[in-house]
Amino acid sequence: MISPQDQALMAQALRLAEQGRYSASPNPIVGCIIADAAGQVLSQGYHQLAGEAHAEINALNNASIDLRAATVYVTLEPCAHHGRTGPCTQALITAGVARVVIAMQDPNPLVAGRGIEQLRAAGIHVELMPNSSAAEQLNRGFIKRMSRGLPWLTIKTAASLDGGTALHNGQSKWITSEAARLDVHYLRAQHDALMTGIGTVLADDPQLNVRLSKAQLKIDTDVVQPLRVVLDSQLQTPSTAKLIKAKGDYLIYTAENGVNANGFQADHVIPAPVDASGLSLPWILRDLAARELNSVMLEAGPKLVASAIASGLADELVLYLAPTLLGQGTHGITALGPLDTLAQKQDLTITDSRSVGNDLRITALLNNT
Amino acid sequence: MISPQDQALMAQALRLAEQGRYSASPNPIVGCIIADAAGQVLSQGYHQLAGEAHAEINALNNASIDLRAATVYVTLEPCAHHGRTGPCTQALITAGVARVVIAMQDPNPLVAGRGIEQLRAAGIHVELMPNSSAAEQLNRGFIKRMSRGLPWLTIKTAASLDGGTALHNGQSKWITSEAARLDVHYLRAQHDALMTGIGTVLADDPQLNVRLSKAQLKIDTDVVQPLRVVLDSQLQTPSTAKLIKAKGDYLIYTAENGVNANGFQADHVIPAPVDASGLSLPWILRDLAARELNSVMLEAGPKLVASAIASGLADELVLYLAPTLLGQGTHGITALGPLDTLAQKQDLTITDSRSVGNDLRITALLNNT
């Protein structure tokens, strides 16, 4: 039986897990709370960095007392296999805890349920929370990669209240406020890769990095720069581009094969197949998932945004709306082809809207799944 | 001295005033609370219907005890003149109240301050609240009419997340949810007139009325239908149009003079001058203010919306955003002319955003004043 006390302690473990959100990838983020029967927290831990201890191990190591009557709250099924660290199930069995409450099963279908089985076989009372949606939300990128071999794909864009992103002559800088542009860096820090198109590279020369300090992100570890990804069918990225020069790593996907006039390292330039809309986005996203990237944020022009939406592989749209009107003839957020009937419209579900400076940030899920 | 207790009682009077928001026009809405020195409310009243008693009179009539030590909180300076009802100042003086706290002065520059003077001359201690913004917000239409001879002009529109209102072929029905369409009726009920263009009449044949019950509006009085206004330069409105047939009154502004093929009553058809953008919106708005209309909501196509914005006379934009993407070639919310530099953009201030069903409602002030 899951009690209200169990619910409250698991909620605490879920919040704790979030402390790993800027650093745990490609691993899932996990939080673990150990409490006595009265609900008193005895110890806690979260997973901070891939290759380092899992949340359960950190919580066990942080405990200095006898845990034999304790309940362990963990936001993801404990691992049962030897990875870079030992199996967490064994550590829990050795500690002799009485009960383990788990927010969700391992999303990898090959191992889901094994950790639970091992704990039960050792006589530990294991319970799965009836509602796993909050835990799934935390690791939606990891879950999508494990279950579908694809990363979570966020599209970030900005527009005026009349839906424009740039004037008819292309002028577009500074539509959103400084506060909105700062907010984007927090979004970037939560993604494993930032993707753009060669058009944006040539027009804007973005750095496409996270320009926030450890203190701003409230983390102890160094800031991890997301991988920068350019879709560049004709390999036109200048070797002097800021996103090439900036700290951190980059990948250029191209239709050119063997041509590398700009002298990029061979393993930074990836030949990719082409489909009707240009470089194959499904292929590239699968390749990024194979490289253990859980989440990708696209910051690009209307054409690439349209390709991402049309591919059916985009999960979320984050739209910053600036309180201004740009008038007719402006470029929209997406170059999705004209529709002939309303039945063809692409529906979304708005999950959040909030003020960011003078702007409004709208988050919506694309109803693909 | 205005104490925290005074602030709290005035806040209560402001909330009370709102009960008249669907019925008091062309009068301002006003709330009045009478309290003893300990802050105990002795009586209260609000202004419900033009021609009937003012808030102060209702509050005095509702009181059954001696008010000689009482403080009266009134959201607008009491009237000092004989209108359809006697002056409120005289009633307050007769009741012998000790103190009157006023949220804001009369916005009519010809009489502002006179009520305060009369009360003070009678020995009543009168205080004006230091911040009148909440009181001004309640009567922004009345204030604009009194101070500038123009009604408050709200533009109501709806769009998809990519800024479209209709497909390239004109299809547009049902972009927003039923909840949003219901919400519009509450907005309509708060306006004295609803304005549209002949294009919308011919394309959609809207009723342009309030389809809410007394119970839905939480009022005791009958539902007052806003005046329906059509901008129809060539007098093409069919005599069978729903907004002509519906309960309540209508006006048609036209450039035609003396031609009335459809047999409308002469006082329903108003010849109006024409300017570069068509029928002169400034002239029409002044005419509506002269008819004692405090507020007008425009529900029209992108061309008339653009005229209203370009006129500099629009105050507020209410934008319902539907969680969908309509693709390229769609009509936007406004046909504002193309801009050549970002400095020409029309800036607004977002004052509210909230979920209405699956849609998002954004309210923004046009920065004209």
Image (cartoon, coloured by chain):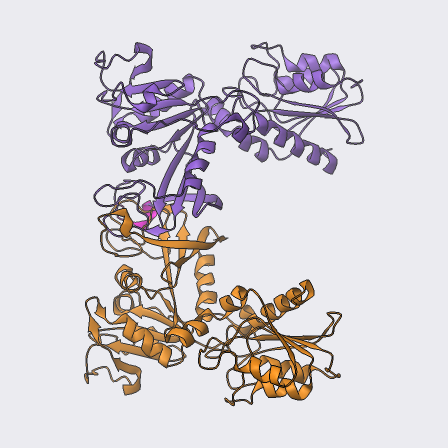
Chain colours: A orange, B purple
Give percent across and percent down for residue A313.
33, 66
Taking the image as drawn, is residue B294 in sight? yes
Instruction: Please give the name of the residue rendered at 47% of the width and 75% of the height, measured from the top-left corner.
Output: A107
Do we see residue A245 in this rendering?
Answer: no
Residue A90, image x, y percentages: 60, 88
B281 lies left or right of B233: right
> Which residues lie in the magenta part?
B339-344
- The part of the image, by quadrant, that contains residue A40 is bottom right
Q: In what quadrant of the picture does the N terminus of chain A appear?
A: bottom right
Q: Nearer the viewer, residue B328 or A117?
A: A117
A32, B68: nearer the viewer: A32
Give the residue drawn at x 38%, y 72%: A151
Q: Position of residue B351 (x, y in %)?
A: 49, 43
- Residue A256 position by quadrant: bottom left
Horizontal side of B116 relative to B233 (left or right) equals right
Question: Where residue B217 sits in the image (x, y, percent)?
Answer: 53, 29
Residue B340 lies in the magenta-colored region = yes
Q: At 25% across and 66% down in the image, what residue appears? A: A199
**In the rendered image of this protein, does residue B313 appear above or below residue B109?**
below
Q: Residue at x 37, y 27 (%)?
A: B208
Q: Left or right? Give the position of A100 relative to A247.
A: right
Image quarter (top left, top right, bottom left or bottom right) of the C terminus of chain A: bottom left
Residue B342 among magenta residues: yes
